[in-house]
Amino acid sequence: ALVYVLNGPNLNMLGVRETSVYGTIDLAGIEKLVHARAERLGMTAEFRQTNHEGVLLDWVHESHARGAVGMVINPGALTHTSIALHDAIKAISLPVIELHLSNVFARESFRHHSWVSPAAKGVICGFGPKGYELALEALASSVSAQ
Ligand code: DQA
């Protein structure tokens, strides 16, 4: 089963960026965790990052076209700004898990609203890189429950 694991703006800077908030693991380290966990769950992960909103939208559409069974997405700050991303997720009939490394609710109030959450199957935040593995597990059980 194919699952898309998509990352939005500034997540390429993990390991360097605000390490007190996001920790010291870089995106390549997270990608390794994701592939290992996906394999154990019998899934294949397509793992990508972009700083461009339109590219992220294209990948959301592509996941549907390629017959993915679900998606984990960390949209970065697009979470809080992008109605287009909300619409793209609504347009694909796949379970989508919204994921944040940090607990956005314990941070600035501008991070408390998400355009993605109403279109998502569920949300995981605050568990750092482990959250990606938790999200894959949630996806695996919601896919097998279908
Ligand atoms: C983030 C939280 C967002 O508010 C922020 O803009 C990010 C990262 C997270 O993983 O904690 O870029 O999505």
Image (cartoon, helix red, strand yellow):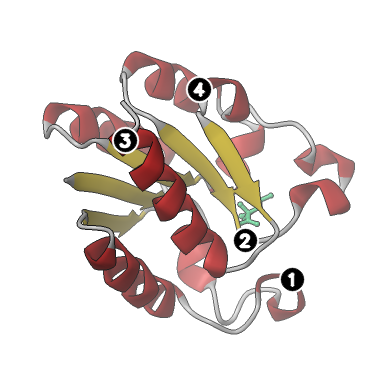
Kind of residue at disc 2: Leu
Q: Are marks 1 and 2 in contact (CB under 8 Å)?
A: yes
Could you give the CA–CA distance between mark 1 and mark 2, rounded to whole angstroms?
9 Å
Q: Is mark 4 within 8 Å of ligand 1?
A: no
Could you give the CA–CA distance between mark 2 and mark 3, rounded to whole angstroms?
23 Å
Residue 146 sits in quarter:
top left
Could you give the CA–CA distance between mark 3 and mark 4, rounded to whole angstroms?
21 Å
Kind of residue at disc 1: Val
How many neighbours does mark 3 have within 10 angstroms: few (below 14), some (14-19), or many (20 or more)? Answer: some
In the displayed image of the protein, which residue is found farthest to the left?
Answer: 66
Q: Which mark is residue 21?
A: 1
Query: Which badge, 4 or 1, is on the more N-terminal residue?
Result: 1
Residue bearing the label numbered 2: 101
Query: Which badge, 2 or 4, is on the more N-terminal residue?
Result: 4
How many neighbours does mark 1 have within 10 angstroms: few (below 14), some (14-19), or many (20 or more)? Answer: few
Q: Which mark is residue 143?
A: 3
Which one is in front, 67 or 54? 67
Is any atom of residue 107 visible in this view?
A: no
User: Secondary structure beneath disc 4?
Assistant: helix
Q: Is mark 2 within 8 Å of ligand 1?
A: yes
Could you give the CA–CA distance between mark 3 and mark 1, rounded to whole angstroms?
32 Å
Q: Which mark is residue 86?
A: 4
Kind of residue at disc 3: Val
Kind of residue at disc 4: His
Q: Is mark 3 within 8 Å of ligand 1?
A: no
